[in-house]
């Protein structure tokens, strides 16, 4: 009989080995699914994992990996700090939208003036927008002890309605004959978050994501605040005796994750997306939650997890376009990856014992 | 197998290979906003893609990507297709407008066809259908058949195309039934069966016994069927599986002739950037079969309307029509110009509620 025995501390070996094992298992299970759909499984796996990085058109896809991974990493790094402390900001999607609205509004207010200060102001406004939106669940939690999971999640839907209202109303392009959507910021040089080097996909949002990873790493491993965050997550009681101010911690973690999500939204709206439109948000805020856990709430892990998620998206799209694999099969494939990653966590936290049967 | 047949086989194989090399198939790409199985908008675009394959056989190769979000992801999907060797790419949703223009600028040799938009370039054409002509027929049936005098309308997004449809349906319902009232619910989606079903149920609860929709799923039909004694119309696709009740007729988007035409133009090297806006007359908009649930005289009136529009004898927006605020829009006998229709952002007189701003 197989028995699970809890390890006193998670196995270091399995903590890092399970992601690799999970990817391999996904390839096998996903390959079987693709074969069942009548597609060549080896070609499909190659298209998803190999082609975007080293294939014929990798020069384009590598840049797109950064474009896709940038916002995921930026948001996930912020979320991970809160998650470590047991503060659950599930509404990053809403903060992302508000950051985009605030930032784009500042940029559009200056139109058509050209000045180097416009873009930095937009970034600042994006961070402010995200922070303010995150402060709603934070303050309700510290003042009235509401559940931040519910409040932050529901505020996503409020933000989506505001986004639609902005795209149709105040931020609508006055030159577009009644069609919704703002002016395209890509065509407004002072407000545009264009590629820093043409064709690389490297824009300010990607740079910000890398900086955020480094800062979070230092904060969590070297700074007193990082110690407080970890302590609060592992033992809230001990944290209180240790002089951690829970109110300050909630405000800091929600505020920081909101600011990063807001900045991600601004970089996206001023760069790859280009404009405030009704459907501007495409789920980065929610996917970032997966990325945070996939990266084990560790900044370096999140960096790798963000790139891996981006790879499954980009490669998955390529498989759809070139092999005509249905979109639903690609989503199932991504689901498998998460399933195996989280399922295999059991190896990190438990030891598997084979015991003899007979003891009834 | 003897030597002779082997030789013949080889010659045949060589001949085929030679023919293939001589004329590379034209590659046509399609970017879809919903799943090909949505039963509505994307379904019809995909049917037209299949018609292109059928028409040209091995002279054409088609690729498609479904469920492509409108925004940065769309730009990537188009770039992927262009890199993959597509000669012509059809981008089949309004939200693909700026991405199409961006990608087209990077691939001057690839032709782009953007549905329902208004931005063109040397290698970007736009095309759309005059769905409002079909709405005139729907409005006529709705106005004559409703018992509660309440029509529910599920709008997707408050963009000119949708507003045009609401106005056209209302004008013609009002013509045959002066007591008619419309209520509009904005779903802010093209395809979301759950949201569409909720909207339909809400409208039916408010007393509507006709549900018109500008969204792409059959969920409103299912809701109408459940409620009983409520009629609905197929949107974008025939949705005949819900006939004869609640689905009493439909507006069918028929893209196949246009797609075949444009692919042919690429083959012949005669492709040019242009703007196409066709209606019932040229066959881009079709009225699906009117079922027996519709009384004979209603059916006759609807068909008469259809034929008058097809023949060019009647324009659905013919004055006198005032705007919602009472100001004059079209004088007696005046016909709306395409520019105003293309950017229509106002309701006509008699409609209640506001267009979300």
Image (cartoon, grey):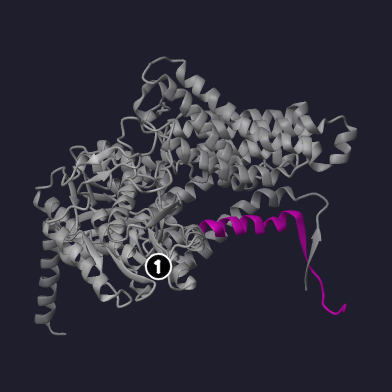
Q: Is residue A343 magenta?
A: yes
Above or below for A146 versus A114? below
SS for callout 1:
loop
Residue range highlighted in magenta: A333-360
The location of residue A300, given as percent across then percent down, is 62, 38
Residue tagged 1: B147
Extreme residue toward the front, this view:
B178
For this view, does B234 lie left or right of residue A48? left
Q: Residue A360 falls in which quadrant of the image?
A: bottom right
Above or below for A172 versus B52? above
Give whichever of A21, B83 is nearer the camera.
B83
Indicate the quadrant containing the N terminus of chain B: top left, top right, bottom left or bottom right: bottom left
Above or below for B214 versus A155? below
For this view, does A222 lie left or right of residue A277? right
Give whichever of A141, A343 is nearer the camera.
A141
Indicate the quadrant containing the C terminus of chain B: top left, top right, bottom left or bottom right: top left
The location of residue A217, given as percent across then percent down, is 67, 32
Residue A66 visible in rendering = no
The location of residue A258, given as percent across then percent down, is 62, 34
Label tally: 1
Give whichever of B230, A209 is nearer the camera.
B230
Q: Chain of mark 1?
A: B
At 37% from the left and 58% from the top, the residue drawn is B180
Q: Residue B190 falls in which quadrant of the image?
A: bottom left
| Label 1 CA crowd tier, 10 Å (few <14, some 14–19, many 20+) | some
At 56% from the left and 38% from the top, the residue drawn is A73
The location of residue A192, given as percent across then percent down, is 40, 26
Q: Residue B239 falls in which quadrant of the image?
A: bottom left
Residue B61 visible in rendering = yes
Q: Is residue B55 magenta?
A: no
């Amino acid at each position: 009989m197989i028995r699970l025995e809890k390890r006193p501390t998670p196995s270091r070996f399995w903590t890092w080995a399970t992601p690799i094992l999970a990817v391999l298992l996904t390839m096998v299970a996903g390959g079987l699914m693709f074969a069942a759909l009548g597609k060549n499984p080896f070609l499909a796996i190659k298209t998803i994992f190999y082609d975007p990085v080293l294939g014929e058109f990798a020069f384009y896809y590598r840049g797109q990996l950064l474009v896709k991974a940038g916002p995921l990493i930026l948001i996930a790094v912020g979320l991970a700090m809160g998650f470590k402390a047991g503060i659950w900001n599930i509404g990053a999607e809403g903060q992302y939208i508000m950051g985009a609205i605030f930032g784009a509004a500042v940029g559009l207010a200056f139109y058509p003036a050209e000045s180097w200060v416009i873009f930095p102001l937009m970034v600042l406004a994006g961070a402010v927008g995200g922070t303010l939106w995150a402060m709603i669940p934070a303050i309700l939690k510290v003042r009235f002890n509401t559940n931040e999971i519910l409040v932050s999640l529901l505020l996503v839907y409020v933000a989506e309605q505001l986004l639609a209202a902005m795209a149709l109303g105040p931020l609508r392009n006055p030159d577009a004959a009644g069609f919704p959507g703002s002016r395209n910021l890509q065509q407004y040089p002072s407000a545009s978050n264009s590629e820093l080097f043409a064709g690389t996909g490297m824009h300010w949002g990607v740079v910000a994501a890398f900086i955020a990873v480094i800062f979070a790493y230092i904060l969590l491993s070297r700074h007193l605040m990082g110690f407080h965050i970890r302590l609060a997550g592992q033992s809230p009681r001990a944290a209180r005796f240790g002089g951690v101010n829970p109110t300050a911690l909630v405000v800091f973690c929600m505020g920081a994750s909101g600011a990063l999500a807001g900045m991600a939204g601004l970089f996206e709206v001023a760069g790859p997306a280009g404009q405030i439109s009704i459907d501007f948000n495409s789920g980065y805020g929610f996917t970032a939650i997966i990325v945070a856990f996939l990266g084990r709430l560790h900044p370096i892990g999140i960096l790798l997890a963000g790139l891996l998620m981006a790879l499954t998206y980009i490669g998955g799209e390529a498989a759809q376009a070139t092999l005509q694999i249905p979109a639903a099969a690609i989503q199932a494939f991504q689901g498998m990856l998460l399933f195996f990653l989280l399922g295999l966590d059991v190896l990190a936290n438990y030891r598997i014992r084979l015991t003899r049967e007979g003891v009834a | 197998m003897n030597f002779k047949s082997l030789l013949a086989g080889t010659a045949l194989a060589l001949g085929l290979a030679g023919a293939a090399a001589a004329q590379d198939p034209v590659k046509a790409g399609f970017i879809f906003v919903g799943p090909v199985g949505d039963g509505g908008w994307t379904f019809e675009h995909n049917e037209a893609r299949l018609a292109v394959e059928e028409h040209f056989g091995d002279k054409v190769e088609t690729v498609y990507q479904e469920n492509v979000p409108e925004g940065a992801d769309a730009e990537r999907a188009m770039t992927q297709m262009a890199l993959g060797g597509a000669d012509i790419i059809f981008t089949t949703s309004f939200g693909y407008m700026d991405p199409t223009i961006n990608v087209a600028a990077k691939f001057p040799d690839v032709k782009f066809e953007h549905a329902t938009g208004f931005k063109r370039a040397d290698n970007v054409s736009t095309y759309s259908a005059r769905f409002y002509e079909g709405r005139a027929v729907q409005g006529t049936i709705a106005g004559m058949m409703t018992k509660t005098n309440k029509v529910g309308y599920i709008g997707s997004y408050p963009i000119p195309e949708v507003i045009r449809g609401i106005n056209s349906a209302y004008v013609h319902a009002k013509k045959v039934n002066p007591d008619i009232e419309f209520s509009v619910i904005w779903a802010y989606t093209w395809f979301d069966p759950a949201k569409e079903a909720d909207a339909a149920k809400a409208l039916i609860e408010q007393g509507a016994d006709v549900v018109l929709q500008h969204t792409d799923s059959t969920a409103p039909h299912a809701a109408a069927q459940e409620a009983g004694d409520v009629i609905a119309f197929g949107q974008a696709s025939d949705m005949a599986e819900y006939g004869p009740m609640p689905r009493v007729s439909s507006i069918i988007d028929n893209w196949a002739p246009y797609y075949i035409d444009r692919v042919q133009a690429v083959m012949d090297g005669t492709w040019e950037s242009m703007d196409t806006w066709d209606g019932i007359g040229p066959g881009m908009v079709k009225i699906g079969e009117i079922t027996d649930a519709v009384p004979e005289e209603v059916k006759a009136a609807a068909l008469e309307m259809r034929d008058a529009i097809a023949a060019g004898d009647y324009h659905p927006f013919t004055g006198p029509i005032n705007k919602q605020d009472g100001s004059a829009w079209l004088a007696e006998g005046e016909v709306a110009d395409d520019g105003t229709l293309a950017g229509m952002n106002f309701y006509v007189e008699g409609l209640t509620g506001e267009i979300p701003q």
